[in-house]
Amino acid sequence: MTVPTNSWDETKPAGSRAINLGDDDIREMKTQVREVIAADHNMASSGQSATTGQHNKTTLLVNADDPTEQADAGILYTKDVSAKAELFYKDEDAHEIQITNAGAINPLLLALSGRFKIGNFTRDMDVASGNQSITGVGFQPSLVVFYMSGPDDGDHATIMFSVGFDDGVTANCQYAFGGFNYLGLATNRSIYYEGTTSGRAYYGHIGSMDSDGFTIAWTRAGGTGTANIMYIAIQ
């Protein structure tokens, strides 16, 4: 905001001020009021308009302390989180919701508001490397969480699984096989199957976030059988 031309002074005009200076004081006050209102609102220095007084933007200063809840009212405000101003809402029962987080809509808020999709699909690991398009999500995700369970490869009669996270740029997952005797962390992969027999692996990551889902880029390194994958996609 631009600093107003004149400082606000509620003691002016003083009772001793000359009457012939009153018009100057009136014009000064009009300018002060307009400049303050125009910080966020549409207000010209003259004339009239159907949009006069309407918001151009809303600037919320960071609160040092949380506002006190008020009956029959909701409060929208900002406060610092990790030295960054974030947007919050508090209802009359003092329930506080953080709306923004690190330059984006709070992912938890999106999930609670219904902007997420739980689904599942399979992948035949006898199929060569290539892409697999997953649709029906209903939106373009910003983050997908995967849980994959794979078939026993014959060496261990135990489950093979991975849990991964993928935003289309960064992909990481934790995987296990051999009855939790073998654990690993895979980077650049959000879905990972590792057979206990050498040369049996199948893994993938999100190659693109699409308007109605996402596309998995798969790499086959000897994997076989069917992988069952569950996912949570968050907008």
Image (cartoon, rainbow, N blue to C red):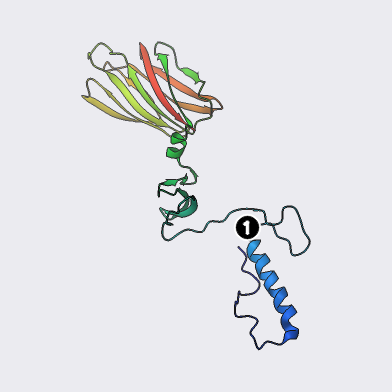
Give the percent coordinates (x, y) of residue 101: 45, 45
Q: SS of the residue at dot 1?
A: loop
Q: Is residue 125 visible?
A: yes
Residue drawn at the location 77% of the way across and 58% of the way down: 48
Q: Residue furthest front?
A: 72
Give the percent coordinates (x, y) of residue 146: 39, 26
The quarter holding residue 31 reads: bottom right
The total of numbered circles placed on residues is 1
Does 62 sit left or right of 199 as displayed?
right
Q: Callout 1, which amino acid?
A: Asp
- As rendered, which of 189 and 209 lies closer to the eye? 209
Rendered view: 3 above or below 211: below
Give the percent coordinates (x, y) of residue 39: 63, 61
Label 1 neighbourhood size at 10 Å, few (<14), some (14-19), many (20+)?
some
Give the percent coordinates (x, y) of residue 8: 60, 74
Residue topped by disc 1: 40
- As rendered, which of 154 and 74 lies closer to the eye? 74
The quarter holding residue 201 reads: top left
User: In what quadrant of the picture does the N terminus appear?
Assistant: bottom right
The quarter holding residue 70 reads: bottom left
Residue drawn at the location 67% of the way across and 53% of the way down: 54
Does 168 sit left or right of 197 as displayed?
right
Does 34 sit left or right of 201 as displayed?
right
Rendered view: 220 above or below 79: above
Does 115 sit left or right of 18 as displayed?
left
